[in-house]
Image: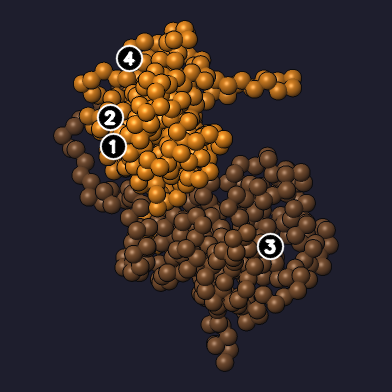
Amino acid sequence: MKNDQENQPILQVKDLVVEYITDEGAFRAVDEVSFDIAPGEVFGLAGESGCGKSTIAFAITRLQKPPAIIPSGEILYKGVNLINLSDSELQAYRWTKVAMVFQSAMNSLNPVITVEEQFCDVILTHTNMTRSEAIERAKQLMDVVKIPRERIKDYPHQFSGGMRQRLVIAICLVLNAQLIVMDEPTTALDVVVQREILQQIYQLKDEFGFSILFITHDLSLMAQFCDRIGIMYKGKLVEVNDAQEIRNYPRHPYTKKLWSAFPSIHEGRKHYKPNLDFVPQIVNA
Amino acid sequence: MSDSNTPILEMNAIVKDFQSTGFAKSDIFRALNGINFKIYKGRALALVGESGCGKSTCARLITKIETPTEGNILFHGQDIKEITSRKDLLNYRKNVQMIFQDPFSSLNPTHTIYHHLSRALLIHDRCANNGKKLRARIDELLTLVELPTLTADKFPHELSGGQRQRVNMAKTLAVGAELVLADEPTSMLDVSIRLGVLDTMKRMKSEHDMAFLYITHDLATAHYIAEETAVMYKGQIVEWGDTHEVINNPQHPYTKLLISAVPDPEIKFREVIEQDLDFSSHAEKVRALSGHKVNQAKQVNHNHFVRLLAG
C-alpha cells in the first residue's frame, strides 16, 4: 500500500480546458489536455508560441486571470483538486507546494527592494519563521545557487541576468516546493549561461527530489533535459512519450516538423576529418 | 579570410571605447579591442558571441551610428569616415541596410506595407513615381520574399513576426542593398518558421549576390547560413574562418566552451553533467583566460585562425 502511494503522480492534469473570453466568443487555448508528472520527474511541454503551453503553466499555478477561465477539467496535486481551492487555500499551496520560474526572471524580482526583502516576503508570508531565521534560510539558499551570501543586501539591478535567474530559482526552493514550473527559464540567456543554470537545477533536483514541469520551444534542449515530453499544437497535446522516443521515433507529423526546424551543429562534428596536410603557423592578427 | 574578389567591406583594427561620465569619475569601457574582418559579395559572415561581447557594436559602427575610436572601416576601399555629403550618405545607406532583431517595432504601425516599400523605392530613386509601376515592383518584391501580393495592403499588426521580417527583407531588396547587417533577425521568431526566413536570406545571397553580416548568439543558425564564422569574446575575435572548420574543429577554449554548451539531443543531461561536474568553474576559467588582448594568432588551416592565449 505504501509503495502505491510513492508511485502516485505528484501532479495529474485531467481533460483540462482553458478558454479566453473574447468579443467573438470563447477561444479555446487549452483543449482537453491530460498528463501526469511523477515525483522527481522532469516533464517537458514543447510547442510554438500561442500553442497553449504557458497557459497550462498559469493554470497549474492557478495564476490565470479573467478573461481566462477553466470551464472543465481537473488539476490534482497529490490527489487534491486545485480548481476547487479557495484563495486562502491557494496561498498555502503556492511556493510551499508548487513554485514557478517565469520566462524573464529579471522582471519577476521587485526592482525597489533588496534580495533579502524578497526572500523574507516569501518566507514570512508562508511560514511561522522569525525574521532572523528567514534571513538565515535565505543565506543557505544563496549558497545552494552559488551566489555570495554578502550580496543579499543588493538590489536586483546589481546582478547579471544569469544571477537574477539563479536568485529566482533560490526563492522557488526556499520553502521546499515539490513541483517547480519553469516557463522558458533560460530563453533570454546565452548557451553557456543556460548550461550553467540548467546543470545547477539538475544537481539540485537530484539532491532535493522535486519534480519539474519544463516549458520551452527548444526541442534539442528539451530532449536532453527532460525524462518525458509532451508536444503541443493548437491547444492540444498531440504526442506524449519518453524523451528518447520523441527524439528518435517522432510519430505525429507536427513533432517531425518541429525537429526538422532545427539546424544541428552536432551531426557534422561526428564525421569531421581534420586536414592533416596543412602546417599550422603563427601570424599577426 | 582569403577570397579572390575584393571585399565589399573591411574592418581594420577597430577599437571602440565608450565613456560613461558618472558622478566624480569617468569609466572607459572598451567594447571593441582590435577587430578585423572582411565581407565579400554573395557570402555571409556570422559574428557569434554572448550578449555584451561587442557584436552589435560592430554593426552600429558600420551603419555610422557610432564612430570608431581607432582603426578604419573601408567600403569598396573608401574609408566610411569620408562619406559625409548628403548625397554620399544616402547612397551609402542604400547600399548598407540593416535588419533588426525585433520585427514588431521596426515597421511603422500606422502605415501599410505598400507605404513602407514604396517609400524605400522612391527615396532611393529605384522606381518611377507612378502608381502602376510602383504596384508592379512591390508585387515583384513581395513574391521574391515569398509573401502573397495581397500583403501590400495590410498593416504591420496584421502580419506575424516572420512575415514582418520578410517585409524588412523586401525593403533591402527594394533599394538594391549590397550588404545587409542582420542583427539576430530570427531570435524573436518561432522555431518552426525560423528556417524559412533563413532560407529566404540564403536565396537573397545566391540569387541577388547580397553580402550578409549575420550577428547572432546561436551557433546553429550561423552554421546554417554563413560560409564564414567569427567567434567574439570581450571585444576580440578569438577564432575565425570557414564555418565548417570553426564548428567541427574548434581550437580556442572559448569556442570549445560555446560548442559544448549547445544542447545535443542525442546525449542525456545526466551524461552531460558527468562529463563536466563543475561546468560553472570551468566556464569561469575559460572566460578569465580568453579576456586578454593578444596580437598573435595561429593559422590552423587554409582559412581557419585562432587567437593565441595570453602568457
Q: Report the chain holding disc 3.
A: A
Question: Are labels 3 and 4 assigned to the same chain?
Answer: no
Q: Are marks 1 and 4 in contact (CB under 8 Å)?
A: no
Instruction: Say whether disc 1 or disc 4 marks the residue closer to the N-terminus.
Output: 4
Query: Dot 1 corresponds to which residue?
Result: B203
The image position of residue B46, as x and y in percent, is: 37, 34
Chain for numbered disc 1:
B
Q: Secondary structure at mark 4?
A: loop
Direction from residue A257 to residue B270 in the image, left or right:
right
Instruction: Report whether mark 2 lies on the same chain as mark 4.
Output: yes
* Alpha carbon separation for disc pair 2 and 4: 18 Å
The residue that appears at 47% across and 46% down in the rendered structure is: B160
Camera-nearest label, 3 or 4: 3
Q: How was the colour assigned to the protein in this rendering?
A: by chain
Q: Find disc 4 in the rendering and name its residue.
A: B76
Dot 1 amino acid type = Arg
Q: Which mark is residue A66?
A: 3
- Say if mark 1 contacts mark 2, CB within 8 Å: yes
Marker disc for residue A260: none
- The answer to whether residue B275 is visible is no
- Residue at the (78%, 56%) spot, across then down: A120
Q: Residues within 10 Å of mark 2 (few under 14, many from 20)?
A: some
